[in-house]
DNA sequence: TTGAAAGCGCTAACAC
DNA sequence: GTGTTAGCGCTTTCAA
């Protein structure tokens, strides 16, 4: 990321003179015992009380109009709604949360928003939640377990449930935190909790099978963070698939799940003498390909590379990356559904969802070369 | 995005038997007039009252320990803190918000999380906010102005301020909404509101200048959404720069700010007879390059392409993309600072920050060919 | 169907 | 320095 530090900043104090928040005109039918409360910014906050007064009903009637409309006379309801509309009344969710214990919000915590793997998941989760009248707040942990724990704690009181995507926390920590708020874990199996998994083991088997089919007999696996459950699952499946196919699997890692992680691993990959590489994710695969390019090693001529995720740059890089596609959008929806089940019908059991993955063969894999690539 | 629809789902009802939330052991020193309230999920919610009782002080003392520690006797404070720790007490932010009018949260609304342009901005905003003891909640509008407005409204009561990134709302709508909550607008100039801009006009001039220097005399501009302020700014600057350089600028658009937008525009670009193209963003530029590749048009041999943003895939695509780098991370920090100024010192004036952009020349631009590219 | 009243967890004057 | 008291805006019994 190129950053340009020069900054021009001007502060316009002339705006000091302008009343930024024009007062809202309000008519009140009844004697105004209390004037509408004024918010922190000087704007007028319309409360349930203002509406009640104006309509000439009790606050509880107004409340019901919004939280249990069927319990209120259609005519009254109409009047309340009209006045509410006119006044621009919107229920204060924080206040509602205080009494009901429900906020109508869900939290979504991801390891790294800038990993293109996550955005489709985030989008689909938000869309599904909106359909079910919830909002999703997203936060990023920077791959730091401590930030992750702090975020969970902060979210705990402000959302009804939490989606934990690719958590880096220990299983123990997750168990401990799970008593504070219901949550669904994505990309990690935690006993006793609802989970949404993508079948990376199957993906790893396909990928290794693909390389075996191309004649590769020595395959390097670039693992991800040691705290990544998916990484372990991939490793186990890849080892199994390689050995049952009569090939050697060299495990190299852990690596940061980033382009840089792939770049840094390039030398070791070459040293390993492998002719095929399976990377924990596309970012690593892409970094590796770039580094190999610099080193003058031909992909797939000398070395075949397979990634995981099928992020956009994987289709764009040259050679186009062979990779295991992950059903991220489906996972986002499934995770929201699982979470809302937990939230709306607590105690009725946890669920486990496993989504299939699929190998997408592109141009970064080819038959193994006769000789191993030049290690220098 | 490849989606795999097959799903295996199992519900584990045996967990029904397990007490998912072990009751927290609590000792209470005083007669327990009220037992600790039980949360929606059956877990024990520790409130300020429980702590007060256990320490043997009034709730307000406990409250002060957290919100104004200097006003409380160090010894008392220590005891309160110890008990709070022991009980696992954490202040309920929703309740605090109700009295103070402050939530400690900021909202960040972006047009499209899956556009790689945004994540660095989001990350830096979150980091800066965390430094200043705020949390950032992110939401995505799907480029839909109605969703944007709804999100602003929802956020309004739950955050202290809002960062609007690349809003698609009309200026009028923004003005109207700005009375409900303080906000800072990024990538758009709105009079009377605090803004953080990236100097895209300067970027456009550099880009056009670069193409002119390579001998291009007919340049196509692929604009973005018509509601994008940046797009208009780029257009104006590009037109000016081209005409003052004695070249023709063909404006083609509006285009969706996506890869597909670029793909769809390819035919028109070829028809325009331009030898150089400036795209509203890298996604469009990348889509265009891919489509041109399919059509057998050489980039940069027959057509030079320049993008905006410098997202990761721009460095990865072949040919590597010449593009205008945007200071997204700096913008995120600056926007948070501007917003917190508004939030913490309301009425002290709005600010405008303009950040410089920089042309990064890579391999997608070259001297103009002698003849125009074959239009068929 | 509606009103009255209590209270969610916390803060903020104001007393003491 | 600490206790008292009165709410913040809303929901939710319970009566009427």
Image (spheres, coloured by chain):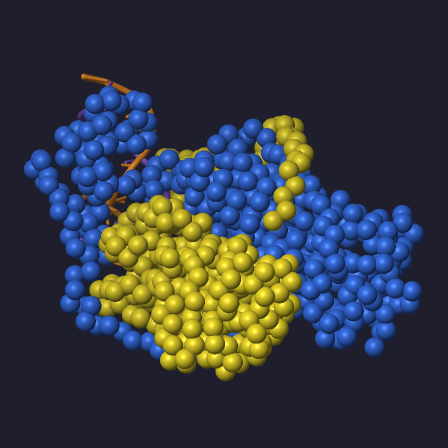
Chain colours: A blue, B yellow, C purple, D orange
Q: Position of residue A89 (x, y in %)?
A: 24, 41
Can the viewer see residue A84 in this picture? yes
Q: Residue furthest bottom?
A: B213
Please indicate whether residue A21 sits to the left or right of residue B155 in the image. Answer: left
Q: Is residue A184 above or below residue A210?
A: above
Residue A154 vertical placement versus A81 (above, below): below
Residue B124: give x, y in percent of width and height: 47, 65
Looking at the rendering, which quadrant does residue A34 occupy?
A: top left
**Quadrant of the rendered image containing residue B128:** bottom left
Q: Is residue B2 left or right of residue B218?
A: right
* Residue at 83% in and 77% down: A376
Question: Residue A346: where, in percent of width, then height?
Answer: 52, 31
* Residue at x 19%, y 49% (from the top left corner): A44
State whether residue A30 is above or below residue A372.
Answer: above
Q: Is residue B98 left or right of residue A149?
A: left
Residue A257, visible in the rendered structure: no
Determine the residue positioned at 19% across, 57% down: A21
């Amino acid at each position: 990321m190129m950053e340009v530090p020069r900054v021009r900043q001007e502060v316009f104090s002339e705006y000091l003179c302008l009343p930024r928040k024009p007062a809202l005109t309000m008519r009140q039918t009844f004697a105004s015992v209390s004037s509408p409360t004024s918010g922190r910014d000087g704007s007028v906050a319309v409360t349930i009380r203002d509406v009640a007064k104006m309509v000439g009903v009790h606050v509880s009637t107004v409340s019901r109009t919004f939280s249990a409309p069927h319990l209120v006379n259609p005519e009254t309801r109409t009047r309340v709604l009209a006045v509410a509309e006119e006044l621009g009344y919107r229920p204060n969710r924080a206040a509602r949360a205080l009494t009901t214990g429900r906020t109508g919000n869900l939290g979504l915590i991801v390891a790294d928003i800038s990993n293109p793997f996550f955005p489709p998941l985030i989008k689909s989760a938000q869309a599904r939640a909106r359909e079910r009248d919830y909002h999703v707040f997203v936060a990023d942990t920077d791959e730091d377990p401590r930030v992750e724990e702090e975020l969970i704690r902060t979210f705990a009181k402000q959302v009804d449930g939490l989606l934990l995507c690719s958590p880096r926390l220990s299983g123990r920590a997750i168990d401990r935190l799970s008593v504070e708020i219901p949550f669904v874990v994505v990309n990690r199996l935690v006993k006793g909790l609802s989970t949404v998994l993508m079948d990376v083991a199957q993906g790893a088997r396909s990928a290794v099978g693909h390389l075996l089919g191309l004649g590769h007999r020595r395959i390097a696996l670039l693992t991800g963070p040691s705290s990544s459950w998916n990484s372990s699952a991939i490793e186990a499946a890849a080892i199994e698939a390689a050995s049952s196919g009569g090939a050697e699997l060299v495990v190299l890692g852990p690596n940061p799940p980033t382009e840089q992680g792939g770049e840094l691993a390039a030398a070791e990959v070459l040293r390993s003498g492998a002719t095929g590489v399976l990377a924990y994710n596309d970012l690593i695969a892409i970094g590796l390909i770039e580094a190999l390019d610099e080193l003058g090693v031909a992909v797939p001529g000398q070395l075949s590379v397979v990634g995981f995720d099928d992020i956009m740059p994987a289709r764009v890089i040259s050679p186009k990356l062979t990779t295991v596609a992950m059903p991220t959008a489906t996972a986002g929806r499934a995770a929201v559904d699982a979470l809302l089940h937990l939230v709306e019908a607590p105690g009725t059991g946890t669920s486990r969802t496993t989504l299939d993955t699929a190998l997408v063969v592109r141009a970064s894999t080819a038959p193994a070369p006769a000789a191993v690539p030049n290690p220098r």
